[in-house]
Amino acid sequence: MNDRVSITIENHVADVRLNRPDKMNALDPAMFDGIIGAIDRLEKEPGVRAVVLSGEGRSFCAGLDMASFTAPAGGSDGSAPSKLTDRTYGNANKFQQVAFGWRKLPMPVIAAVHGVCFGGGLQI
């Protein structure tokens, strides 16, 4: 997980927050990694009975941050990027896992949607 997503757990409820309020929680590569990291953590977290997913600031999620995907793809080490269709998360690729992962958790997930919610935000 990273600074794009925060998790606090209290009374068996995980409060998961998308944390990029300056961009209305738009999805960039770091947000994808943060969401997947949160899902992975919650899958293994003992005692969590429910998850509430929300966004910091005035919006839930403005969808894909197109500007962040215009940079050349590939790792900082010069490695080639994985193809969009590679199933790196069981039956899902990275972009699908951000939405499908919540459904795979063993506890109910409630999306507290407020403000703007477009595209990828609706998928989540």
Image (spheres, rainbow, N blue to C red):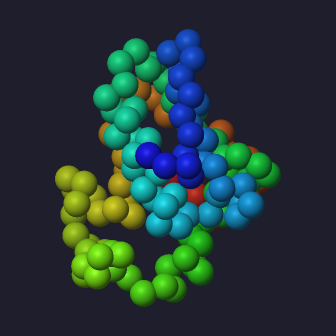
Residue placed furthest toward the front: 77
Percent of width and height locating residue 21 = 72, 55
Residue at 62% x, 63% y is 26
Q: Is residue 27 above or below residue 124?
A: below
Say left or right for 63 vs 93: right
Residue at 37% x, 25% y is 45
Percent of width and height locating residue 58 = 79, 51
Say left or right for 60 vs 3: right
Percent of width and height locating residue 62 = 66, 63
Residue at 74% x, 61% y is 22
Residue 65 position by quadrant: bottom right
Q: Is residue 53 above or below residue 71?
A: above
Can residue 86 be seen here? The reply is yes
Residue at 40% x, 41% y is 39
Depth check: 90 or 28 in front? 28
Percent of width and height locating residue 19 = 63, 49
Depth check: 2 or 62 in front? 2
